[in-house]
Image: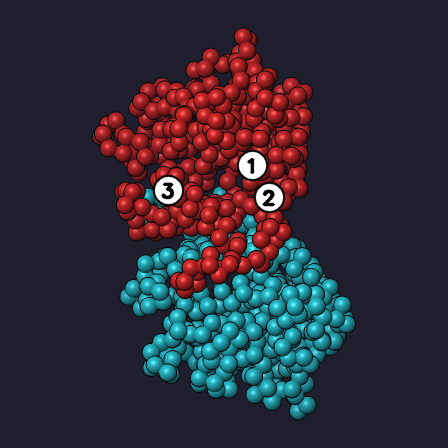
Chain colours: A cyan, B red
Amino acid sequence: MSDARRYFDLSSPFAMKRGGSLVGARLAYETWGTLSAARDNAILILTGLSPSAHATSNADDPTPGWWEEMIGAGKPIDTDRWFVICANTLGSCKGSTGPADIDPATGAMYRLDFPELTLEDAANASHELVRGLGIETLACLLGNSMGGMTALAYLVLHPGSARNHISISTAPQAQPFAIAIRSLQREAIRLDPNWKSGHYDDEHYPEAGMSIARKLGVITYRSAMEWVGRFARIRLDSEQREEEPFAVEFQIESYLAGHARRFVRSFDPNSYLYLSRASDWFDLAEHAGGNVAAALARIDVEHALVIGVSTDILFPLPQQEQIAEGLRAAGAEVDFVALDSPQGHDAFLVDIERFGAAIARFLRAR
Amino acid sequence: MSDARRYFDLSSPFAMKRGGSLVGARLAYETWGTLSAARDNAILILTGLSPSAHATSNADDPTPGWWEEMIGAGKPIDTDRWFVICANTLGSCKGSTGPADIDPATGAMYRLDFPELTLEDAANASHELVRGLGIETLACLLGNSMGGMTALAYLVLHPGSARNHISISTAPQAQPFAIAIRSLQREAIRLDPNWKSGHYDDEHYPEAGMSIARKLGVITYRSAMEWVGRFARIRLDSEQREEEPFAVEFQIESYLAGHARRFVRSFDPNSYLYLSRASDWFDLAEHAGGNVAAALARIDVEHALVIGVSTDILFPLPQQEQIAEGLRAAGAEVDFVALDSPQGHDAFLVDIERFGAAIARFLRAR
């Protein structure tokens, strides 16, 4: 399969916020569109926990990306005008250096010897990439979900690094409900006897734990309202059912099983644990003496678009309002858009009609 | 420890809705107050998935019950006036016959040979108990959570069995979000290698699976809003933390762990699976050709109180409205009370101030 990924070598050693450093680490990224001569038309996209850098298709990799309908010529993030960069998060397993990579100090996989990872580290790595591409100031920094938290860290740590900001379904700090969910996802993986404190292999793989983690993710990424309309109480045909006791019986269960099946072997469990914990640790307030508003007040962008969804239980609407108010207080001109998409946290991935309209309108005015 | 439990022998064989029957089965129950000479002051309480029949303390068992502040002399359910009965659900493990009991046909524990259990079976068993106590018509049938579903089945299956009804945080049919959560709880137990298709013992016990199931329960029983105020991002003291990788760090995680610890060994995993699946199966519409409203229209009570909580994600408010409207259409005089308790689904257990006021007001007028 063709691959559009490029790799950027981070500074070496790359110092980590909580101690330790990475030697010879790199970020996988993709780009679309053309950087202008003035280098002033770049948009950086920071992703949620699991996506790769392949946000949309291109000549080198025509497979659809995770935001295929959002990015491209004539699309809301219009590559005829913008130079779009998407990076795979530091610590992930989609090309960027993470726990599943070889530790040059030992010649063996890092596994749990990978240094403690924070979203600030992910932000710093992405900032190095942008500078490495010769870009002083981004036209826009866009982050969704975990990537939205990373983007807030990026803007606080690197003042003047972006003229505009798009913040989608994210949080200025992790709240206890989201921590509880993620903690339980990690527990399911850790309690799987095949996890072996990170020393699994392909034959002995924490499949059960990863399956539970993913299903719990999907449950909290979507919304009850959407599922009432979509699945109701529809049952599987008898030939689709397994014989084992308490086997799945309803379509909603089979839908979750399908999501788990597609995810389990395609994402490194240790990487999942590191990124999940980094999300729990994230608290922008740490950058301003424990005060979220004060931390947001340090962010210096001209315009911001903050989008939230009323059915999102993981990153609820009040947290989006908090970001919008904080950026406004910091002097930015802020568009706050509360959407009634039924798809919950995942709406930005699927409700392209509503999200695309808001993003297109914002970017056209820049 | 003293015990206030009594036991009622069900008809034998006791036929089950989906086939099979129980021989020599019984229900554990407790009572408070005095049955009037006219036998017209009885209130039956049907519980959620995990509680025992010990709803409140009494002379034989002074330990606090699970609804201690709600039931008693001068309390919202006033035992000076009412004769209150609480039954442990058929299939549970708190005295009523369930999968952890001995199958008289084999002399061994039922385990997964227990017949398939539905909430209709639980309703029929409770109805036999009431009739066995010499009560023709209940003054009031009260059900909360799973017990609310059982109560709706009871009223449809036994017309004229109750003059009044109190329905709390329940559902006329299981919806996909709740099914997804419960299915995942069952999966956590089933995937635990110690579950062994139901053949665990005290030494090899599905502790990890039960822990995940309980934590997921607690997460969905409470609300994000409550936890922001209660736990915020408070961390454990370093001496409270374990050394293992990815160990719990926040108070919210320790709170969940405490809930799991208290539950895991006190509830039979097979019983949990049976009751959880019975909840998923529940669909009152089955009693009226697939139409919920038509099924509710078969319920014949004079007055009903329907209470829901705006922060309940497991049994959301629209389902309570559906019950209220259905009972109203059936000719009952219905008080619908939507509470803003921050505690989510569990509010009826802890927000005694709001719930108690509504219940006391309703019962005083009867």
Count the labels in the image. 3
Q: Secondary structure at mark 3?
A: loop
Task: Give SS at disc 2.
Answer: loop
Q: Nearer the viewer, mark 3 or mark 2?
A: 3
- CA gap, disc 3 to disc 2? 25 Å
Does residue A361 show up? no
Of the image marks 1 and 3, the number of the one nearer the N terminus:
3
Q: Nearer the viewer, residue B256 or A342?
A: B256
Labels 3 and 2 positioned on one and the same chain? yes
Residue assigned mark 3? B265
Cα distance in 3D space between marks 2 and 1: 9 Å
Q: Secondary structure at mark 1?
A: helix
**Residue depicted at x 50% and y 26%:** B57
Going by the numbered disc 1, the residue's amino acid type is Leu
> Could one spot residue A17 in this view of the protein?
yes
- Which tag, 3 or 2, sits closer to the chain's start? 3
Labelled disc at residue B349: 1
Question: Residue A20: x percent and y percent?
Answer: 46, 78
The quadrant where residue A138 appears: bottom right
For label 2, the residue is B343
Q: Residue furthest front?
A: B239
CB atoms at circles 2 and 1 under 8 Å apart? yes
Q: Which mark is residue B197?
A: none
Chain for mark 2? B
Relative image position of residue B140 (x, y in whole percent): 57, 21
Chain of the residue where label 3 is placed in the rendered structure: B
Q: CA distance from mark 1 to mark 3?
A: 22 Å
